[in-house]
Amino acid sequence: MSGSPLRQRLHRWFTGGGEDQMLRWLLRVLLIATVSVLALDLSAMTGFKPDSLWREAMEQPVLPDMPPVTTDVPVTPDGGRRVVPARKADGAMAKPMTFSLGKNGRLIATGMIAPGSADAFAAEGNARGEYLKTVVLSWPGGSVSDALEIGRLIRTKGFATEVEKDKICVSSCPLVFVGGVKRAAGANAIIGVHQVFAPDPAEAARHDTMSEAQRVSARCQRYLADMGVDLKMWVHAMETPKDRLFIFPANELRELNIVTPTNVAANAGAGR
């Protein structure tokens, strides 16, 4: 056999006979099993980064599972929490956001915050130039990362934000909403939050994502502090399961500085 002395010794050891034959075969099996396990682990890890689970957190858009105007929001015994079931968004609301231009510098954005929506929003803003003054939201949530980017861009540009009468801004949409320099909510507008979650629970369950969840939560809290919003807003989000929505009553929209005082309709929010 050609090759190094070590390779020759290993070859003789594995192929030799004698009383150690059984042990040699057992070692072969163990080596094969070990290599197989390592290969499977490597395959599972290839291309996987924990952050990828959270980069598009809240990717599945949701809507309150209730009519926005005709049904009262339940009040729980703790003195004012409004928590309603959430359902998966459908139709136009489940599609990536689209933009239309309204009067008086209003950019009307409808649909989910898909991965890449921040880039689309930035391009839209650049295309419209100084005409834009207010971003009008009607969103069922979506990518947290994109929501934070859009919110910061709105603040940098000095835009106002608005949720019109009877419209919704839930899940990660309120992160965008609070980016506005001025923030208005129309009559019966629904603004709600819930827990951040990875879009693929099955994949997340295979990995320890606690540190990533904490990192995303810290990033959102830092953002809200930068926007001048009371961090109790995030407490409500973290206390509300992903299949529910905490709907802010009108008084809390004001108290937490989610809406700005000069732009609050008397019956804004869902606390009616």
Image (cartoon, helix red, strand yellow):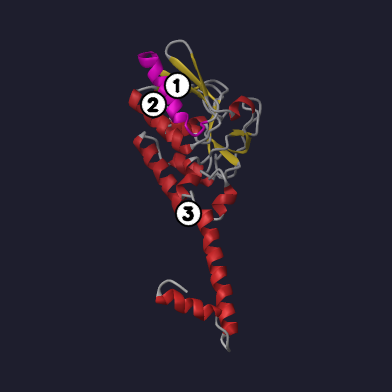
Q: Circle 1 sits in a helix, a strand or a loop, which is it? A: strand
Look at the image and say whether residue 269 sits in the magenta stretch. no
Q: Circle 2 sits in a helix, a strand or a loop, which is it? A: helix
Is the residue marked by circle 2 packed among few (<14), some (14-19), or many (20+) residues within 10 Å? many
As measured in the structure, the alpha-carbon distance from the residue carrying label 1 to the one carrying label 2 is 8 Å
Residue at 56 percent across and 69 percent down: it is 32
> In the image, what residue type sits under mark 1?
Val
- Residue marked by disc 2: 154
| Residue 210 circle label | 3
In percent of width and height, residue 77 lies at 59, 44
Would you say 60 lies left or right of 259 here? right
- Residue marked by disc 1: 135
Would you say 254 lies left or right of 91 here? left
Name the chief secondary structure element in magenta. Answer: helix
> In the image, what residue type sits under mark 3?
Met
In percent of width and height, residue 49 lies at 46, 49
Would you say 157 lies left or right of 265 here? left
- Out of 142 and 53, give the one closest to the viewer: 53
In percent of width and height, residue 101 lies at 48, 14
Residue 226's image quarter?
top left
Q: Is residue 132 visible?
A: no
The answer to whether mark 1 and mark 2 are in CB contact below 8 A is yes
The answer to whether mark 3 and mark 2 are in CB contact below 8 A is no
